[in-house]
Each structure stands twice: as structure tokens, then as C-alpha cells.
Amino acid sequence: MTGPTAVNSDVARPRSALTETVRSMASLVFALVCFAICLRLLDELPAAAAGIARGVRRVASIEALAAETGLKLPVPAYFPDTIQWPPSDVISYGGTSASAWYRHRGERTTWLIVAVAAGAGGVAPQVLPTAQVLQSEPITVGTHAGVAERIQDADGAVWHQVSWSTNGGARLVRYRGTLEELMTLAGSLSERGR
Amino acid sequence: MFALAGLVILHATLSALFAEVIMRLWRVQDPGERAALRWVSLLLPLIAIPLFAWLAPFRSSETFAATWALFAGLHWNQVTVAGAGLATIATGLLGAAGLLLFLRDAWPFLADRVGRSEDGDTIADPAATDRIASAIAAIRAVDSGLPEPRIVLLSRNAPVLLCKGVDRPLIVISRGTLDRLGPDELRAALTHELAHAHYRDPLTGWLLMAVRTSAWFSPATQIVARQLVQELEHRADLAAARTAGPEPLGRAIAALSDAPDADTDLREAVGGLSRTYRFLDRAEREAVGERCDRVFHHPAPPTSRVPRLRLAIAVGGLAALLFFIV
């Protein structure tokens, strides 16, 4: 015997090296998959508790959003008296999409959503409430080609929405009022944001 | 800095869990292999975070956290308590727990190795020295791979038996230890200490303390480091049981554990119990019994045919997992 490293354990080696390697790899993959599933489920919990989609982050204000992510959420120059300022929620997803949610003064429910995205991907659906498109047609907003849609939210309320691409990004305005008012709102959005 | 500390705590906790799961799935019983896996779970979080930041800086983006990450600590800050995010609160609480665990062990460690000197306590006792020398000669006749240590003999009546020396092994033994142990028990106890010297465990102790100091705020790091020490003790127990037999080792552990003022790693119980919990006398006795049982019932735990390959795939798997945790 040449030191304690010479382990007297030949009796306990029932498997071949290949079998042991394969079994070890298989159980490692099993463990990794289990860990991945558990971690992903855990990661869903805070969003579920906060009532937002996974990866969505609430931001204190439009200014805070610009400071933290560089995203500038434009504020319409035409701002109906019925809409309450400041926005009730400013949320961001992945640092590339964000939206501001505004409430109606009288009804205390969300009536206006202004969203912006950086890059070519368009506004991430995570920053908008789920809705079903009822009708869609092409339009122009200023000099930009876009799409106007009539949509229905999860509560059955009908909204209007316009979205268009800008240089290096996309914008979207969703409004619960008339299409004419929505077009005025969209047309009044400053290119640089305010 | 606070977010970075939170990430280290998260990675260290998951690494510790991963190592524990892998050891169970692979049925790793050899203390050397277990210690290697625990080293991986200790070091990988500390290495991976700066390495990933350098190789894949996009991991720190919100886009990665929202799309590719399996788990993002930042997401837990969406749930707030009294205005503070849960991730921030958890980092603060766990950091405080980590500091307490670190101080609990770091202070006695440093006091034992730096502050204490046996100079005034050493004696020259030819009879005792001959007894120790003949025991070591008998051990080395059976196992020539064990080193020949320097011996320091202390006059005190309390049992002391320790292995020291980062470069050259040094066994510190007291008259109280010699009085309590018969020839076979002394041989078993000394083999245990020589095994520590053979594996350079005193150096490992310093390295462990360095790792613990660098992640003083991480409870998982502190706990895994303690578990690793238990693996080293078990490895030395097995070496002693092979050379001197499990029964004398068990008797030596029992004899030294009975003394309330004993200063020896042979008194360290399994399962993380320490002197802090000495008031749980019964629990400590049970834990010492468990330590002896392990040696009696599993004197030669099975070893892997491909330990290095298994270690490599464990490192790869854990690194892959940690990559997606931000």
C-alpha cells in the first residue's frame, strides 16, 4: 500500500467505465432539465404575483424609464381632458419595449396606452394587455405607413389602435375612444418624444 | 455592488444544490470525489460571474433576462414589501446570515492558527516521544506513503491532537491524549492525522478560509465549506480505518470525544455539528456515533472508474446552468 490514496475498493466497481459515463451523463442531463424547469417556474412567480407578464418591469415614471433604459416614451401634444395625467403605469420589457398606461378621469379604468419599441421587432406584446383584432386596415401617420385596428380586450370592451414604424423603432397608440380622436392623438406624438 | 452580491448568493446556492443532487444521483460515496464536487460548487460561482461578464456581456441586458434567462433575480424586485423589492430584501437577509456563519468559523480558525502558540506548553518527555515514534513507525510500516511528521508534545492534561503545517506536517499531541489512548487507539488516531498531512489538508483549510472570506456574505458558500471539511475528516477516518482498523479508530474517537476540553479534529462530528452546539450533548454524541458507524459500515466506499470525466461533466453542466441565471 502506498498511502491513503490507494483505496481498497475493487469490490465496489460493478460497472464498466463506459456504462458509468453514459449513466452519469444521462443523470446529469436529467438533473439539468429538472433544475431548468424549476427555475423557470420560479421565475414566473413574481410576474404572476404582480399581475404582469414575465420579464416585464414596472418603472416609476417616463423620466425614470428614459434614465434606466434609454427608451423615450412620447407624450401626445393633443391630450384629451378626460385622460388623467400622469400615467398609472409605465412598464418595460427587455429594455427594448415600453408602454405608458393612462386612466380615464371619470371611469378610473385604462383608456389610453402609448407604446414604443427600439429596433425592428415592433412593440413587444408583453407591454400591452391581451386583445383580439376585429378589423385591420393600412393608414398613414404623418409621413409613416402604419396600421389601424379595431380590437376587443379581455373584458369585451372595443378599442382602436394605430401602430407605425419610425426610424429605428416602432410606435403604437391604443385608445378606447373614437378612431378620429385616436388619429389626432397619434398625429400629435412628437418624433423625439417629450 | 449589492446586485453583484445577490448574484453570487444566488449562484452559490444553486451550485450547492446542484452538487448535492448530483452526488445523490451518481451515488458518490468516496469522500475524495465528494470533496472535489463540493470544491466545484464553491469555486464555480466565484469564477463564472466575472468570466461570463467578460465573455458574454449581453447576459447583463434586460433583453437576456426577459427572454433567454431561466431565472433572473431582478424579476423578484417586481414584488415589493414596504417599498423594497423581494430580491433586495433577500440579498440583505442572506448576506447578514452569511456574515454570521463566516464569523462563527473564521474567528476560531484564525485564533487557533495565528494567535495560539504552544511554545510555553511543550515538554521533552523521552518515554512519550518513543511511544509516539514507535506508533508512527508501525503506521508507516503498513502504509509507507504516509509522511513522517514533526511532533510537538504538550504537557497539558486536556486531549490535544492536531495536524498542522502547510509545508511540513506537524502533529501536535498532548499528554492528555496519550493518557487516554491505548496502543491501537493511538495508532488509529495518529494515522488519521497523518492522512490529513498526506492530503495536505492544513493547506486546504487555508484555501477554504480564503474562499469563505471572498464570499463572506454567501450562506451557501459557508455551509458548503463546512461540508467539505467533513468530507476531509471522513477521508482521514477511512485511511485510519484501513491502516489501523475501524474499531480502534472508533474507540479513539469515543475516548477523545468524552473529554469536554478536547482540542482535536477527531472530535468533529458529522453533519455540521460543531462546538457551538455543545449544549446539545445528546445530539453531539449521536453525531459522533454516526461518524463511527460510517467507518464501520462503509470502510471502503465505492469509487468511480471515471472520476475526472465525471468531475469535468459536472463542471460543464453547472457552468451551462449558471450561464442562464442572472
Image: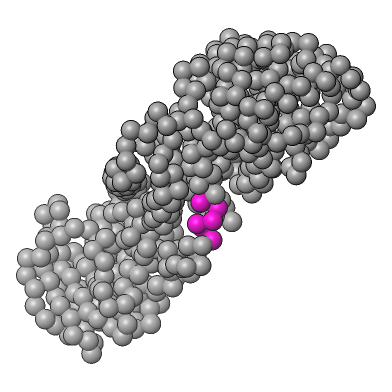
Q: On the rendered image, what quadrant is the C terminus of chain B found in?
A: bottom left
Q: Residue at x 26, y 70 (%)?
A: A123
Q: Quadrant of residue B235?
A: top right
| Horizontal side of residue A181 vs A25, given as left or right | left
Looking at this rendering, what residue extends furthest in the left direction?
A135
Q: Residue at x 15, y 78 (%)?
A: A147
Q: On the rendered image, what quadrant is the N terminus of chain B found in?
A: bottom right
Query: From where the camera sits, is residue A31 visible?
Result: no
Q: Quadrant of residue B197?
A: top right
Q: Residue at x 15, y 68 (%)?
A: A160
Q: Residue at x 63, y 23 (%)?
A: B268
Query: From where the camera sits, is residue A150 visible?
Result: yes
Compared with residue A172, is residue B215 higher up or lower down, i.e. above or below? above
Compared with residue B14, is residue B156 higher up or lower down, i.e. above or below? above
> Is residue B184 part of the magenta span, yes or no?
no
Q: Main secondary structure of the magenta part?
A: helix
Looking at this rendering, what residue extends furthest in the bottom direction?
A143
> Is residue B47 part of the magenta span, yes or no?
yes
| Horizontal side of residue B217 vs A30, given as left or right | right
* Residue sitting nearer the eye, B303 or B158: B303
Q: Position of residue B170 (x, y in %)?
A: 77, 34
Q: Position of residue B99 (x, y in %)?
A: 64, 39
Compared with residue B118, is residue B19 higher up or lower down, i.e. above or below? below
Bounds of the magenta span?
Answer: B44-50
Q: Quadrant of residue B282?
A: top right
Q: How is the image coloured?
A: one colour
Q: Position of residue B200 (x, y in %)?
A: 66, 40
Q: Position of residue B104 (x, y in %)?
A: 67, 32
What number of labels is visible?
A: 0
